[in-house]
Amino acid sequence: MRCKASLDKSESSLVSLSAVVLGFRKGTLQERRNVICAFLKHLNVHEVLRAEEDVTPRLSFVYDTEDRLAKRFSPVGVFNFTSLLLSPGDNTLYIGAREVLFALNLSDISRLQLHRNFTWNTPERKRDECSFKGKNLQTDCFNYIKILLHVNATHLYVCGTHAFSPVCAHINTMDFSLVRSSTGVIVTEDGRNHCPYNPEYKSTAIMAGGDLYAATVSNFQGNEPIIYKSLGQGTTLKTENSLNWLQDPAFVGSAFIQESLPKGNAVGDDDKIYFFFSEAGKEFNFFDNTIVSRIARVCKGDKGGERVLQKKWTTFLKAQLLCSLPGDGFPFNIIQDIFVLTPSKEDWKSTVFYGVFTSQWYKTAVGSSAVCTFTMSQVEEVFNGRYREVNRETQQWYTYNHPIPEPRPGSCITNAARAQGIFSSLHMPDKVLNFVKDHFLMDSVIRSQPLLVQRNVHYIQITVHHVQAVHRAYNVLFLGTDDGRLHKAINSKGKTHIIEELTLFLEPQPVQHIILDAEKSVLFVSSYSTLVEIPVANCSNHKSCGECILTRDPYCGWTGGQCVDVRHHLKAPYKSKILQDIEDANIAICDEALPKSYSAQIPSTCALPCQVIRIPANTFQVLPCKLRSNLAERRWEYSKGAGRFLYPSSDGGLIVVAQTDREESYECWSVEKGFWQPLANYCVKTEPQHESTMLIGSSHTPLMPKEEPVILPGDARSSLIENKSYWNELIVVCILLGMSFLVFPLIVICRNRNRMKAMLKQSECPNMQQKKARMAGKPTESLPLNGNTVPSSVADHKGYQTLHDNCFCSTPTQECSSPENSKSFSESEQRPLHLKDTHVEISPTCPNPRVRLGSEIKDSII
């Protein structure tokens, strides 16, 4: 094995690395090898993701552009659109926000007068209790609507956090108000086990057959996760917390699959509810928690056990979802959102689970996310496979390879169980239920490789639309990002193409929900405070056949000289006349396909009207040319003689220098897969330039001979522009640079010559003082202050010394060889110092005061 060979070279260091870095506690050498191999693979994640370039959206639309119309609902003072519920039957979209609910009329969500709303405030007493418990009064202690579901045709079920005290109620859709008692009081019920306490906690809920299935937390601290069944006529059921069936989960979605259909099938299986979440993977023996994505299921007909697992799930099983890269197997292990695509209720076996995943080991990147799919056959295979067993004492997980009791633990009541006389979970043998308590995790992993990997994009929401195109059906992906963008993508021939990118909100903010209204062919996308309605198709934006084909949009096809929505033209005889090629985007099927050769004559019928631009002679003008497609290349067409006066600009435009007495035309074309599309057509006319008049630029541009091109700023010159040598300019620049190095020091010396003279004069101060004293022949001090004679020895003389600006001034010495003076000086040195022997003198030569301590004279710096 290749990884094994690399390990053998430095076994001890790598084993240490596994223990230190990965936190590997115990295990055999082979287990350590496996962990190290996985770690070595993860080290290459940056190189792997860097090697795979992000898929570029073909079209990009900015916020509120006319090319991609959208309707918006953003009421003032309303925040946190936490729940959305589409009701096509009454043409209404229900929104639950912070302490307010809306019923939007789908005819036009932007018209506020068409909508209904009411507030559901939190009482001040509850808010005070919330604040007393340590929560933020300004953010946490409100009523955030977390559950909004249909109960029947006339009522909705709604739950809110209610300042960390969850409460549920019913809404009458006829007048859109909370159901009240005969006394006018709102009828509420305890929201525990239904709704989370914390509005930031991820939870999910679904209504199936009149029963509410909620996955949330059951306590104030948020450390007791639970999957709970209630509201129906049967017994309430929940997961067993003491058995650690859930490990700090973050729920992202749930689905109700009617696996009992079609009626009378041979298996006779029960309907199931699936939950999707990420949690700590305790089966991995690492110090740090490894997050894994899960799919869990319970049976709709579960009634709990009679003696074992009373009022607990007897059919709870969970398995790991793994979305990993091919080759090295790098995992995107955190599920962000899930969409369950079921063609029909009876065709549930064709169900496909679309998930958006991120990785906990790639936090330093801007984004990095992946889209994976899992089939129902994969899910069934794993849930019918082997179990994992946990040792309660050591918390170690192992594959269970021993005989399994009958009926199969965790399965629903099927015809096989009924044949054994078991018609309900209450009839299950105790040994089967005891087995489920410790064998709720499946051994196998549900694996998938990404359809789409984006290194710099962070997807957090997904919705899928099954669309019938001209030749076959496609699944169109709508992906929401954490900065408020929406990507529309398809997968064909194993490759994903992003059709378009839309910026939905004025300020970057995460996409919270994406809801598809298939009947109206519109999407409802929400952020914290804004709801946007956009059509799924934008076919009218494509003005030519080639552009309609290149977009690869299953909604669009070319017929009758325009790009139309094919769903309205799939009936005979219109279907055969529609041009569409999603797989290859072959423009050869278009009659309007232009020649591929760059030098070919472009038909004048395809060119745009010429836009006349007048500029003064020997000045320049930037001709803009904006590409419609991010995958196209820009090409300019002009006469050969004009090439010497053209320069590319940084934004893809063309800088044109006006030539005297000449008129030129410039055409900008978009080239994509051989398809030429005109973008701009300019006719540049030169006007005589007045002396001291300049229409463009801030300085006068001198006249240049036609042989000499004007050097202008811009990107690298194109291949059509003639190359020019710059050796002469380089020599001139070098000479000027050398001269500047010589002239600059001279200028500095000249401007500071007076200061330099002053510095030199100060440095000559000591010598000048000594010379003047000797020439005068008069001592500065004829007699010491103590009355003694001056010492005769120059070496013994202490002298006056002062330090001022690094200039030393010394008092000249007096030559005296009198023995008496020498004697008195020695005696003065030997006497003890008294205050009366201290004298201060200020000399006119040196301004610092001089202090005489006995016979010693020193200058004092004050």
Image (cartoon, grey):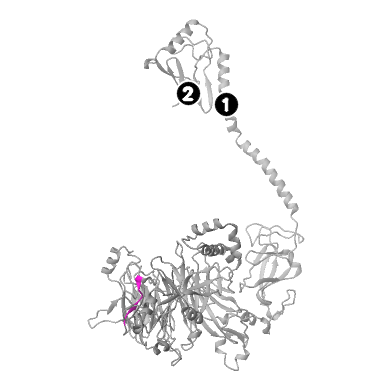
On screen, 723 above or below 438?
Answer: above
Type of amino acid at the residue the image marks with label 2 = Pro
**N-terminal of the two: label 1 or label 2?**
1
* The residue positioned farthest toward the front in the image shown: 403
Quadrant for the N terminus, please. bottom right
Residue at the image point whose x is 52% and y is 7% from the top: 817
* The residue positioned farthest toward the right in the image shown: 707
What residue is disc 1 on? 763
What residue is disc 2 on? 847
- Total marks shown come to 2
Q: Is residue 198 left or right of residue 128?
A: right
Quadrant for the C terminus, please. top left
**Cβ–Cβ under 8 Å for marks 1 and 2:** no
Q: Is residue 408 left or right of residue 159?
A: right
Residue 354, position in %: x, y?
A: 50, 77
- Where, by quadrant of the figure, is residue 274 drawn? bottom left
Residue 708, position in %: x, y?
A: 75, 59
On screen, 418 above or below 76?
Answer: below
Q: Is residue 347 visible?
A: yes
Q: Which residues are magenta?
A: 235-242
Type of amino acid at the residue the image marks with label 1 = Ser
On screen, 529 above or below 813?
Answer: below
Q: Nearer the viewer, mark 1 or mark 2?
A: 1
Q: Which label belongs to residue 557?
A: none
Residue 456, position in %: x, y?
A: 54, 67
Q: Quick one: SS at disc 2?
A: loop
Residue 588, position in %: x, y?
A: 68, 82
Residue at the image point whose x is 32% and y is 65% from the top: 137
Q: Is residue 418 left or right of residue 307?
A: right
Q: Mark 2 packing: few (<14 Cα in 10 Å), some, or many (20+)?
A: few
Q: Nearer the viewer, residue 538 or 823?
A: 823
Residue 571 among magenta residues: no
